[in-house]
Amino acid sequence: PTDACRSPTTSIASRCARRSRSRGRRRAHGAVRRVRCRTCRCRTATIRSAEPDPGHVYVVAPSGILAPQRLERALASLDTLGCRVTLDRAATRRWRRFAGTDDERAGAFARAAAHRGSGTVMITRGGYGLSRIVDRIDYDAVAASGKRFIGNSDFTAFNAALHARCRAASWQGPSLGEDFGRDANDDAGPDPFMLHSLGAVLVGRAQSFRLA
């Protein structure tokens, strides 16, 4: 990365990538089939393509910068819930007040749609920034991916644009930092109702509520 992209959170991204690779070895997302090479008859392995896993969360940063400490707490919270997390390569970058340049942040949606294995995409935080890139996102790729894109705040612009362009659904829901990165001075951790609702979205379970 260039000097403009280096930040204290680089080590966080590296640790997350190592953690993700380590988990991937323990929790395989595709069956492995042994085959023989037709040329030299040596033994090789072919890995069939993986099905998207809703519990594998791909994190994008379309708006402002998320504080490194909050990011660490959020990753630990999702880890406790049993989620596997992949950080987009631009999620910890900095450009002015944003998490990367406009092109880097817009490109994160295409990378999320193309990422193999993950079934859920979540933003790091809301605020301001997504409205600057709403016309640069590949909505056809997002809709074709079949993934659950979740966020709030200025993510509403993405919700509306995706539905207007492709008639595809996305979700208003938690963001990584604001909902999972709380410390002891905040409310007592992630909201239980939010966690229940998010769990239903991740597994495709219908919900019913009784209004008082």
Image (cartoon, grey):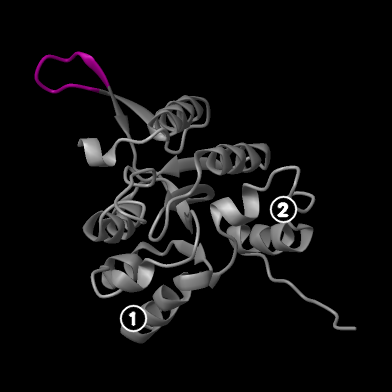
The residue labelled by disc 2 is 190
Residue found at x 36% / y 86%: 164
Per the image, label 1 sits on a secondary structure element best described as: helix
Q: Position of residue 79 (x, y in %)?
A: 61, 37
| Relative horizontal placement of residue 151, taking residue 131 as reference (left or right) | right
Is 185 rendered above or below residue 197? above
Is 74 rendered above or below residue 63? above
Front position in the image: 207 or 5: 5
Q: Is residue 38 magenta?
A: yes
Front position in the image: 196 or 3: 3
Please identify the quarter of the rendering in which residue 108 is found: bottom left
Is 212 rendered above or below residue 23? below
Distance between mark 2 and mark 1 Cα atoms: 32 Å
Q: How many discs mark residues in the rendered view?
A: 2
Quadrant in which the C terminus appears: bottom right
- Mark 2 / mark 1, whichever is N-terminal: 1
Query: Neighbour class for label 1 at 10 Å: few (<14), some, many (≥20)?
Result: few
Q: Residue furthest right?
A: 212
The residue labelled by disc 1 is 166
Per the image, label 2 sits on a secondary structure element best described as: loop
| Relative horizontal placement of residue 103, taking residue 155 as reference (left or right) | left
Is residue 55 visible in the rendered structure shown here?
A: yes
Extent of the magenta region: 36-44
Overall secondary structure of the magenta section: loop
The answer to the question of whether label 2 and label 1 lie on touching residues, with beta carbons closer than 8 A, is no
Q: Position of residue 122 (x, y in %)?
A: 49, 57
Residue found at x 50% / y 44%: 67
Front position in the image: 161 or 53: 161
Q: Amino acid at mark 2?
A: Pro
Q: Is residue 42 magenta?
A: yes
Q: Amino acid at mark 1?
A: Cys
